[in-house]
Image (spheres, rainbow, N blue to C red):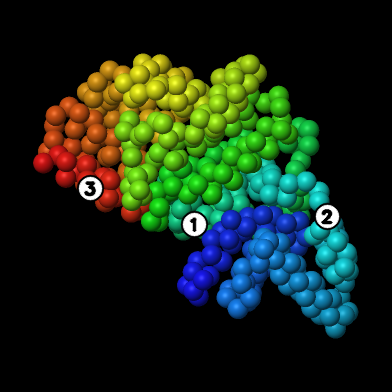
Amino acid sequence: MTAAETRQAIEAIFRIERARLIAGLVRVVRTVDRAEDLAQDALIIALAEWPRTGVPANPGAWLMTAAKRRAIDAIRRDRMRERKHAAIARDRDGAFGGTPEETDAAMDDDLGDELLGLIFTACHPVLSADARAALTLRVVGGLTTGEIARAFLSTEATIAQRIVRAKTTIAKAGLGFEVPRGAERAARLASVLEVVYLVFNEGYAATAGDDLVRPDLCREAQRLGRMLAGLMPGDAEVFGLLALMEIQASRLPARTGPDGALIPLTEQNRARWDQMLIHRGFDALARAEALGGDGPYALQAALAACHARACRPADTDWPRIAALYDRLRAVMPSPVVDLNRAIAYSMAFGPEAGLRLLDAMADSAALRNYAPLPAARGDFLFRAGRLAEARSAFEAAARLTRNLRERAFLNARADACD
């Protein structure tokens, strides 16, 4: 393996292990900032050692051990500083009050899923809803502030400030990084589900970068969803979200071509859809419906199931999809739902029906720089035979997107209007 290949391998491993590493560390050092620093230290050590010694058999454990040693060194330095200044400042939970050996043992203690505990802590009511999601996407999903900003239709500066304030609030409140129980767990669940789905969405349709999809993020969100379903077997929305993610993930193998280019849903080779994930999704949806699920995730899962049941694009039940979007709009009003509803209407009742709904959204500030909006308009205009207007819309969408694959797809659609 060349040095460049080794570096790529290390960075790929770190992207996979980063969230779990931080989750394990934060339970001991009690602050997200310090856990992130320790994880970054472990990456730097790996970059220095692995090109010489090779990638270890268990790289995740290796990174945790390296971070743990740094944590223990830091504790020893803190102790020395305390002795010198004759000041005793002990953390009320004892995170820094134990010996390095006790800290070492705590890190090895299996107290449940650390990653899930980190998510529930980041979704604590002491934080605003936006701060909860932004912080979790940063520390669990490993998304950049730019990626989070695009997911929230916000600016990088706003998201950066939001994350800093969230970390400060958690540190000041001295929150425990554990999965809550009873009523406290139920109170935080909506935020947790939102965050898990945002992580999945960033994997399903990457907002930036060279790749259109990031399957590692999808897999991680699905894993968290299955874990939540095990923790809360009586919650319809947990199963609705799980069903939604399983069914959508089934299409990942067909979403891109050999060159990484986007393949629209209606043009995908449905033989490549993962049938095992579809059946898992159907099972989860049946469970959600049996529990009386009519919430946002159960409805979105029902929408995804409509596509999964169609053997050919022509078999898609678009009128049912349009009706489901009407129900979804009632329980979860948002500009993005309105946009998707317009797409469903255009497919069910013709492109002019979709254009009328898009015209009604023209003043939506949240969608002003949202590439899917002009992309949808371009598609409706193309199907209506208004090719010059369609080209202009596709070009506008291509200018807005930051994903290179999506931009290439939109430019190709613009060229097809000639």
Q: Amino acid at mark 3?
A: Asn
Residue for point 80% across, 60% down: 107
Residue 209 lies, with reference to residue 279, above or below; the image says below
Dot placed on the residue nearer the N-terminal end, 1 or 3: 1
In the image shown, does 418 or 309 lie closer to the viewer?
A: 309
Q: Position of residue 331 (x, y in %)?
A: 51, 24
Q: Is residue 259 above or below residue 297?
A: below
Disc 2 from disc 1: Cα separation? 32 Å
Element marked by disc 1: helix
Kindly check if marks 2 and 1 are in contact, taking CB atoms under 8 A apart as contact: no
Q: What residue is shown at x 63% (from left), y 24% (from top)?
A: 236
Q: Secondary structure at mark 2?
A: loop
Disc 1: which residue: 145
In terms of sequence position, does the residue under pointer 2 or pointer 1 come before the other? 2
Q: Which residue in the protein does label 2 denote?
A: 109
Number of numbered discs overlaid on the protein picture:
3
The residue tagged 3 is 411
Q: Quadrant of residue 388?
A: top left
Label 1 and label 3: CA atoms lie apart by: 27 Å
Q: Are there few (<14), some (14-19), or many (20+) residues within 10 Å of tag 1?
A: many
